Image (cartoon, helix red, strand yellow):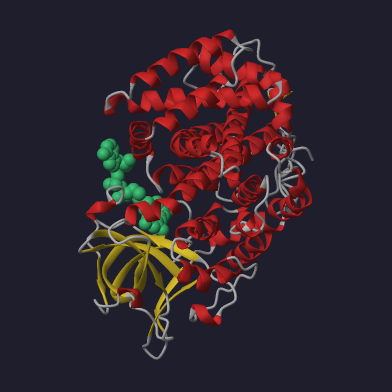
Amino acid sequence: MTKQPLDSAQPVLDLDQALPSQTHEVFNQPTALSDYNAYSAHSVLQHYVACFDGSWGESQLTDYGALCGGELLHAGFAANHYRPEFISHDRFGHRIDQVNYHPAYHELMRQAIKAGHHNLPWLKPQAGAHVVRAAIEYLHTMADPGSGCPLTMTFAAVPALQQQSELAEQWLPRILSEQYDPSNQPYFNKRGVTIGMAMTEKQGGSDVRANTTVATAINSAAPEQGYALNGHKWFCSAPMCDAFLVLAQTDAGLSCFLMPRWRPDGKKNGFFIQRIKDKVGNVSNASSEVEFRNAFAWRIGALGKGVRTILEMVALTRFDCMVGSSALMGLATQQAIHHTSGRKAFGQPLHQQPLMQNVLADLALEAEAGLSLAMRLAHALDQGQNEHEQSLFRIGTAIGKYWICKRAPQLIAEAMECIGGVAVVKDNVLARLYTEAPVNAIWEGSGNIQCLDVARAFERDQQSREAFCSELERAYGQYPSYDQWCSQLIQDIRQGTPAQGQLRRFVERMAIAWQAATLIQFAPANVAVAFVQNRIEQPHAMFGTLNEASDWSRLITRFQAQL
Ligand SMILES: Cc1cc2nc3c(=O)[nH]c(=O)nc-3n(C[C@H](O)[C@H](O)[C@H](O)COP(=O)(O)OP(=O)(O)OC[C@H]3O[C@@H](n4cnc5c(N)ncnc54)[C@H](O)[C@@H]3O)c2cc1C
């Protein structure tokens, strides 16, 4: 090829000239939704706290909201970036079974424990205590769901432990303490302890009756002196907890035990961490595989009735899954609204373009439906002495856990799409919410297990059937389509439970009906109308399919973080 002579009249780019330090100006990017008060900015959360007797907790929630929108939100990133690390032995070769966490994780734990995430309704039982505590959990989940795992387990272990008064006397003061003490030493030397749970084994998670871990009384003439447990657990989250509720087989069948990390004689217990699982989500929470070799444990509850005993705990962990998934949906929605209101495409603000508005409004509607139901159930917990509310809680946790935890991954994927490519990048909280989203649906009884539980509750307890139906009827008289839809559902419920293969359809109908009932009773009319029209009258599969009549911008404004 012949070289063309340069035309001296044309400007020539001198590559040796100093380059400008910046190639371009950054514009059309929103500010980050961080360093704000996650509670003061969340008027929908405030609304349900007030609806369900929690107004007295306002200042506590405002304080925790400031932490969760700021310091703890940042801590959440660090606690997930710097993974927990398992140290099996010390440098001299002694087995130590230590998990080291980043300081940010400890700060999340310390602040949550100070705020009452694990103890508030047990320490200060009063109207609205479970509601305020659920709001604390909601806020904490926005900062970091992973550390929520041991906090929830500690909170939920209390009713099960209360079944064994001498153990409760010894352990509850430390469990209910406001001090977080992460040190690895015997529980009796600590002022604050945390509690975990180990049920799942390799050969069976949902089917805990397949557990092969065996418990043998150390002194068969005096089993109250304790048991030796041998076996394994396939999942044991937060293995630095000070004790674990464990299921193991005895001659009388599956029984529940409290296994301390350190034995009462001050020696290290036969509790051996094999490894920490390398998970895609819920990263700040160390989930381990463990083996028990003559591990000391006390029995809790009746011999052979372990499932019944641990269900006292599991009912509450399931409830927390529901609150947690509502929080994931709430934060994803607020992030999507915030991002799109700070960005233009094709010359127009994104959040004002009709297709985007419809998506955002639909996300807001779903996030509020989840939150309202979670708070309604917290209200049921607060009225533990009332039989109707007890039955409602029994059936409601299964319905709500199934539905809310299943809606979260769909909603979060859609919220990511609103934000675009940057939502997939790890320094955006959406990426973390996305990997976190399926977890709540899987643990503490996966979707199908919840559906089977609804059927079991209905079969065994006529009262829960009636409690549920009357809850739907409370919202009658305002929306004919709701009344009609629910009366068919109630008729079906009273006729019996469908075949197993149809249970998901059945539970889905119940969940939507109950969300509608809750919104009709407690939400502003425009939210209830939009829900009835778009989830009952004209349901669609995708988000962003609300009808024209729903006031999209009002729905968006209501859920938007109020900065
Ligand atoms: C991050 C994380 C942390 C965890 N931490 C703990 C912990 O600390 N302690 C602990 O004990 N466990 C823990 N788990 C385990 C968790 O509780 C189990 O994974 C869960 O209970 C499901 O059990 P599995 O994995 O054995 O699945 P399986 O029981 O094998 O279930 C697989 C699928 O089959 C479905 N299924 C089961 N039975 C039926 C049926 N009869 N009909 C139709 N479908 C059915 C289930 O719904 C599920 O979808 C954790 C899990 C995760 C992901």
326 relative position to 55: left or right: left
Residue at figure coordinates x 37%, y 71% from the top left: 298
Q: Number of labelled discs?
A: 0
Q: Quadrant of residue 55?
A: top right
For the view shown, which residue lies furthest in the bottom direction? 92
Residue 271, horizontal then vertical, whole percent: 35, 74
221 over 386 or under it: above or below: below
Residue 291, horizontal then vertical, whole percent: 30, 70
Residue at figure coordinates x 68%, y 45% from the top left: 127
Residue at figure coordinates x 62%, y 25% from the top left: 519
428 over 48 or under it: above or below: below
15 relative position to 511: left or right: right
Say if residue 153 shows up in the picture.
yes
Residue 461 or residue 363, whichever sits in front = 461
Residue 6, horizontal then vertical, whole percent: 65, 38
Residue at figure coordinates x 67%, y 45% from the top left: 128
535 over 112 or under it: above or below: above
Residue 165 or residue 416, whichever sits in front = 165
Residue 241, horizontal then vertical, whole percent: 48, 68
Position of the C terminus by quadrant: top right
